[in-house]
Amino acid sequence: MKEELITEIEQQMLGVLDNSQMMQLRIVLNTCLQGYEVMETGEISEEAVDYIELFLSAKRIEGRSDKTLAYYRSTVEKLVVKIGKAVNRITTDDLRKYLADYQEEKKSSKVTIDNIRRILSTFFGWLEDEDYIIKSPVRRIHKVKTGKTIKETYTDEELELMRDSCAEDRDLAIIDMLTSTGMRIGEMVLLNRDDVNFTERECTVLGKGDKERIVYFDARTKMHLQNYLNGRDDNDPALFVSLNSPHSRMSIGGIEVRLRKIGNGLGIQKVHPHKFRRTLATMAIDKGMPIEQLQHMLGHQRIDTTLQYAMVKESNVKLAHKKYIG
């Protein structure tokens, strides 16, 4: 591609320069373009592809999920295409401009921009660790400051209203499982009947990074889940299946639609599976559960993530101040 570009420039300068000047032009172009890759818009060089594939292979070995790897690939490839430079020649200024332009064009939130920065930091940090580059250009790009927002949780009244409105044993069991275990919706749809231990009131879920952990449910959930399973007449191993025949494992989207329908009927806004998880975390913190135990229960690698899920009630802060300080 580089030779094609030089030839094209020479063709356009034929009527302007003599032979001696043309030779000098070729020398200058070759010198200036040495070490650079020339690509058409939207094209990724073979070298960049190799770097990305090696990076993804390393992260796959470390246990990253397919979803995370796909996000990594998309983010890095978009950067390489947009900047149009060899990966080892991308500078800090290039990245700053890319992030600023991305935010302007996409109207992205600060959280999104920081997620992109974090992924690029992981990629270029890996290149540095593997000695493909001398220093990561992301080092001098600091974490994007984002305003903290108080994320909503369900009230006890809302949870009871949702339970009372369930016309199907399955829907009641789903709400109870999400409420008492705090598991991710992606973990719940993968559950099979055999994963549930009713005697110990626990089940084994497959979390992020294909890591197994045990989650626990209460007596009410046990009763409603047993009622649901006893009323089923299918042989599907999945814990939660569609109501209509042929019964098949419920998807994340299917559960989200079902919960949203229940919420709309009650006038409860933003009924979503993840909100049950956040509610459990907040309730656990409110009742004094040690943050390390909550971290384990939710399956978080970093305790910072756990703290983002839990909302501490101001009234309890006041009581704690009186107890420990006042």
Image (tube, grey):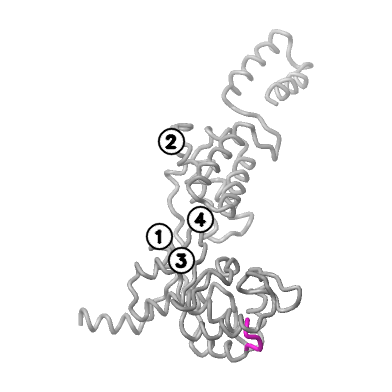
| Distance between mark 4 and mark 3 Cα atoms | 29 Å
- Of circles 4 and 1, the one toward us is 4
Q: What element carries label 2?
A: loop
**Percent from the top left, x then y, of residue 128?**
44, 36
Dot 2, crowdedness within 10 Å: few (<14), some or many (≥20)? some
- Which amino acid does the dot numbered 3 rest on? Gly
- 58 left or right of 166? left
Lower position in the chain sequence, tag 2 or tag 1: 2
Type of the residue with mark 2: Lys
What residue lies at 60% left-to-right and 40% top-to-bottom? 80
Q: Is residue 86 placed above or below 78 in the rendered structure?
A: above
Measured along the vertical axis of the image, is residue 150 above or below residue 223?
above
Please report the residue visible at 57 percent of the width from the left and 68 percent of the height from the top: 191
Question: Which callout, 1 or 3, points to the residue nearer the camera?
Answer: 1
The residue carrying mark 1 is: 302
Element under disc 4: helix
Q: Which amino acid does label 1 sit on?
A: Arg
Element marked by disc 1 = loop
In the image, residue 167 lies in the stretch drawn in magenta = yes
> Considering the numbered disc 3 on the image, is that residue within a helix, a strand or a loop?
loop
Circles 2, 4 touching at the beta carbon (< 8 Å): no
Tell me the tag on residue 209: 4
The disc placed on residue 147 is 3
Discs 2/4, front: 4
Give residue 135's mark: 2
Q: Give the range drawn in magenta.
A: 166-170
Whichever of labels 2 and 3 marks the residue nearer the N terminus, that label is 2
Q: Distance between the residues labelled 1 and 3?
A: 20 Å
- Residue 113 image point, x, y percent: 53, 55
Q: Does the magenta stretch include residue 72?
A: no
